[in-house]
Amino acid sequence: MTQDIDRARDAALEAIRTAGSVADLDQVVADHLGKRGTLATLKKGLGSIGDPDERKQAGASMHAARAAVEEAADERRASLGDAEIDARIADERLDLTEHRHAGSRGHLHIVTQAWERLEDVFLGLGFSVAEGPEVETDWHNFEALNMGEGHPARGEFDTLFVDHVPPGGSAGSTLLRTHTSPVQIRTMLTQEPPIYVVAPGRVFRRDTPDATHMPVFHQIEGLVVDRGISMTDLAGTIEAFTKAFFGSGFTSRLRPSYFPFTEPSAEFDIQRPDGSWLELGGCGMVHPEVIRAGGLDPEEWSGFAFGFGIDRMAVMRHGVADIRDMYVNDIRFIEQF
Ligand code: PHE
């Protein structure tokens, strides 16, 4: 009897060792340990062993055999389970490097390209890059820029307000910045002059998208604060930028204009080699009130600022007919640049 038990145990252990999957193993266990399994059948015969000692010994063998088979099955189940998980992971793996343009790594969006080229040109002119938040306070976006409550120029910025009341603040005083000019204030408040910075970034206005407008677009701000800065420095910087960015065949001009945060204010235009003019942005001498809001003494420091749209630069450079095309991420459009 004990020999039969050992034989059944060895057969079970062998079957367990060679089971190829968890499902196979379950079958092996049922065949050997289950109700109609080899060991169970032998177990039923234990009662008919007449000699008590022999019966006791056979019972102990049976117990040990079942324990050995169960333990081997548990071990095998664990390792088969791991192997199956590994296999499934390998099987379900997605090859994310697979692309129909094998070998091409794609490229930056044309607005990002314009943004980076602008930064490069201004870095070359000795400027550094500053930034500010896209969610702004009314104070930084308007008040400190000489547009107090009720200033008519506020109406020109179709402002998107944020549903957030800051501690101690009032409803409607948090907004999505309508221009990059609040970075002028933040820079003056955190950096000692002399200041020579550009601040590219996203700006927001409540506009319906059309061929030339998007509610989210990009501007680059320039700010210089130093001793004895004059309008000539502004005109010279715009001209140097124009030549560096567009090429030596291009020139620039300033036209009188109005912004609450600069005095005097101007628009600047670029002349193409074919003689045609293109409006680019606004600029001027930083208003003394703005210098003061930046925590500086306007008797000691003066400066100029300028701002213009980055999206338009990309549009001009690549002859994009509809500004919205730049933002639908249609690969047929994107891969042209
Ligand atoms: N912030 C102005 C605008 O968005 C542009 C500007 C910047 C004008 C700096 C003057 C000086 O229209």
Image (cartoon, rainbow, N blue to C red):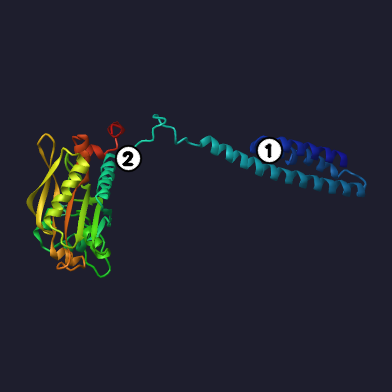
Residue 284 vs residue 72: left or right?
left
Question: Are there few (<14), some (14-19), or many (20+) residues within 10 Å of tag 2?
Answer: few
Element carrying mark 1? helix
Q: Residue 142 at x, y = what percent?
A: 17, 60
Marks 1 and 2 sit apart, C-alpha to C-alpha, by 54 Å
Q: Residue at x 62, y 39 (%)?
A: 83
The residue carrying mark 2 is 108
Q: Residue 275 at x, y = what percent?
A: 9, 36
Q: Amino acid at mark 2?
A: Leu
Residue most toward the left? 256
Query: Can you say whether 69 is above or below 332 in the image?
Result: below
Query: Can you say whether 172 is above or below 208 in the image?
Result: below
Q: Amino acid at mark 1?
A: Leu
Q: Residue at x 12, y 47 (%)?
A: 268
Residue 213 vs residue 91: left or right?
left
Element carrying mark 2? loop
Query: Can you say whether 167 is above or below 179 in the image?
Result: below
For residue 53, say whether it is visible.
yes
The residue carrying mark 1 is 25
Quarter in which the N terminus is drawn: top right
Whether ligand 1 has any atom under 8 Å from the Cβ at mark 2 is answered as no
Q: Residue at x 73, y 37 (%)?
A: 17
Q: Residue 166 at x, y = what percent?
A: 27, 66
Q: Nearer the viewer, residue 32 or 84?
A: 84
Q: Nearer the viewer, residue 327 or 201?
A: 201
Which callout, 1 or 2, points at the residue further toward the start of the chain? Answer: 1
Q: Residue at x 20, y 67 (%)?
A: 296
Q: Nearer the viewer, residue 316 or 13?
A: 316
For residue 148, say whether it is visible.
no
Q: Tell me how many marks there are.
A: 2
